[in-house]
Amino acid sequence: MKPRYIILQVAVPRPIYYSLSYRSSDLSIQAGCRVQVPLGHTEVTGVVMAVQSESDQSKPPQTLKNIIRVIDSEPIFEPSLLAILLWCNRYYHTAIGDIVFTAVPLALRKTRQVPPTTIWQSSSSQQAKDIGRLNRAKKQKLLITTLLETPVVSEQQCKQLLGASYRTILKALKEKGWIQSSEISPYQCFTPSKEVKIVAPLTLTDEQSDAVQRFEDEAKQACPKPILLHGITGSGKTEVYLRMITAAIKAGQQALILVPEIGLTTQLIDRFQRFFPQQSVVSLNSAIARMTRLSHWVALKSGEANIIIGTRSAVFASFKQLGVIIIDEEHDLSFKQHEGFRYHARDIAVKRAYDLKIPIVLGSATPALETLHNSQSGKYHYVHLSRRPGARSSPIITVQSTLGSPLKAGLSTPLLQQIQQRLDKNQQVMLFLNRRGFAPTLLCQNCGWHSQCRDCDSNMTLHAKDQKVRCHHCGYEEHVITSCPNCQSRQLDTQGQGTERVEIALQGHFPDTTIIRIDRDTIRKKGEMDHKLQHIRAGKAAILLGTQMLAKGHDFPLVTLVGILDIDRSLYSTDFRSPERLAQLIIQVSGRSGRGKHKGRVILQTSQPDHPLLVTLLSEGYLSFANALLAERKLWNLPPYSYQALIRAESLKQPNALQFLERVLMYFKEIEGLTLMGPMPSLMERRAKWYRAQLLLTSTQRSVLHHAIKQQLETIGKIRKGGQLRWSIDIDPLDT
Ligand code: ADP
Ligand code: ZN
Ligand code: ZN
């Protein structure tokens, strides 16, 4: 008998762990299509995760609701991506809807259809003769010449060929009647010119060639192992990535390049586009307008674009045929999402590559201890780039004690002298201070009062230009006061310094020098970062001052001196990951120095010049340092030698979160092989009005941990929570 219904497992945008079952008499619906379904009293758009026949379902189909309608005629997710999303559901113990809707482009979260692909072709053959008439309209001429060679080009290609004004040019030619457009299905493969031309002006060093060779050998394996590319800063990793993806591009496959969430994508896109002038390179990140993002997503899905450079969530892009994955700066924390669906893009990328049996490269000058451990246990290959190409050498790092020498807004006299020397030679200086604002504390000298956030256990930072004190954790702000609210004394003072204050001090000291400050206060709008970067590249003497944003990945050839102003706080931190992070930061920031013709130098200002952490890192290098940390972690059974999950809870009334976790604790107490820590208040207990607490689960066996969570998840969900309590699970947490 012919089936009358199919059963659809649908992920809906609600915090529900499993997909919901619906039925449909449209037997042609495939997994990966969006459907409109009834849910409670409303209708929502969901994604079909699996299709089952009538008999697969234990419930009789009569009791299931019908879907309202199907939105897509073809799946928006390929089967391998659906499998990854389902894996995330099991691994991260997160609601399926939260996962799936991370992968659905913003513009497709409701019922909008996937837009068709627009293609352009010439409308008559007369043009070869008339082309001379376009001499003054260079871009129009360029397009017509291209169309004489390649009869059909997509809108995406036009954009690439003609730049930002492509729409105007297309319109002008269309009005002349020279070209015409048509639309094809986004799922139809639009194949642009197959020729893969590469422009490779650099000759690889031996080390670089070896790295590429090792990659190519591995890529030929039936199941390639991930490769850790440990290349010191400035060793030319980008050049190596370009060569590594070439074979895949030539084979008609696509490449995914994941980068940290910093202003680096524009530069990298340029670099990849120049190397592959005929390929379509697109990017996906949250800074791109949603409709542009959608067109990029479609271009990838149809196979028209074959290189994508994106941040964290690009790991969920849809592909026609993904052939290789690169993760640049793989140690970077921004690959981990810290709220909602708490995933790690690097780990998912490794899983995606494994499923597809394609090669993946994890590149960094300061690999994460997890990754290093994987390369030492044989799970990953290890490839090293130990030198900078050409005559460039790595910078020399010196530690400068701030003890006993007076500081001027955080800058020591020797550092100021060094800065002057570089400026005199028309070179650039970069100063790093991971704290924005003028000063982190405003305090009363008379009674000791200091400005505290109303809603958090945290100081308010003074922002002098805005005349505000602001909480950097919740955003709460107030006008600056001139007298102490406690004792009315007018003796208010500041303590410590942020980038705003250092900028003012520098301006006073070097009045004729351009000072470029890069932090979240100066980079608020789109394009501001690129604008500042251009300024830096323009190549005049300047002082660059900034936070993390400035520290990572950039290639500023004129910087010959880097000053790291304040690391003392990190030296005192109790978090077991703190030494790893500090070492990564020091090496990364230092790596910005001496990337051009001139030798680089780094000055590390600290009140703890003999701290063992600094001594080992600077005398033995990152790898030895990291190995020492790994040995310590092994001793204490810490990750990567054990696996962790953190259950967090927060409540508006102080005891509720802790009380809830006390009950959660009961369910895990008896489980063998599981170590529990807590519940205890979080390091910063109150944040944005919520009192926070946590319970840490650790096991040396991943399966024990995951099994326990899976077993108890439903029970935890059923604990009576009283008003206003939120809780979540973080698998492989990075801030415990
Ligand atoms: P990394 O990402 O490893 O820090 P980059 O990829 O930014 O390093 O490269 C650093 C600099 O070295 C860049 O200016 C790049 O153009 C240059 N470079 C890379 N490879 C070569 C090479 N084989 N020959 C000459 N210069 C190179
Ligand atoms: Zn006071
Ligand atoms: Zn606050």
Image (cartoon, grey):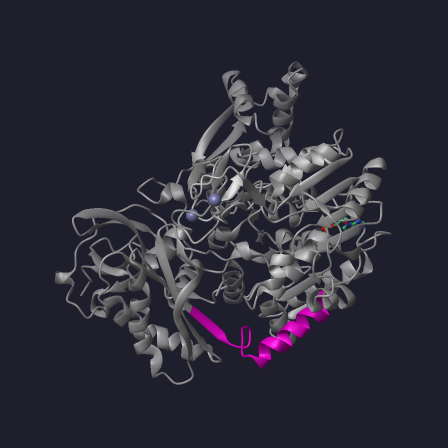
Q: Position of residue 118 (x, y in %)?
A: 47, 34
Query: Percent x, y for residue 14?
Result: 28, 54
608 above or below 425? below
Residue 247 in magenta stretch: no
Q: Is residue 646 above or below residue 117?
A: below
- Residue 581 left/right relative to 622: left
97 shown above or below 126: below
Q: Is residue 344 left or right of residue 394?
A: left
Residue under the point 53% across and 29% down: 121
Toward which corner of the image does residue 31 lie, by quadrant?
bottom left
The span picked out in magenta is: 622-645
Q: Tell me where residue 710 appears, x and y as whole percent.
A: 34, 73
Total number of numbered labels?
0
Residue in front for this viewpoint, 387 or 476: 476
Residue 731, relative to residue 465: is it above or below?
Answer: below
Query: Residue 224, can we see it?
Result: no
Q: Is residue 16 visible?
A: yes
Q: Which sits in the foreground, 132 or 540?
A: 540
Which of these two is toward me, 525 or 319?
A: 525
Query: Quadrant of the rendered structure where residue 79 is?
Result: bottom left
Q: Residue at x 71, y 47 (%)?
A: 407
**Picture quarter with the N terminus:** bottom left
Residue 622, x across and y down, in percent: 71, 65
Task: Residue lying at the far left in this picture: please name it.
Answer: 62
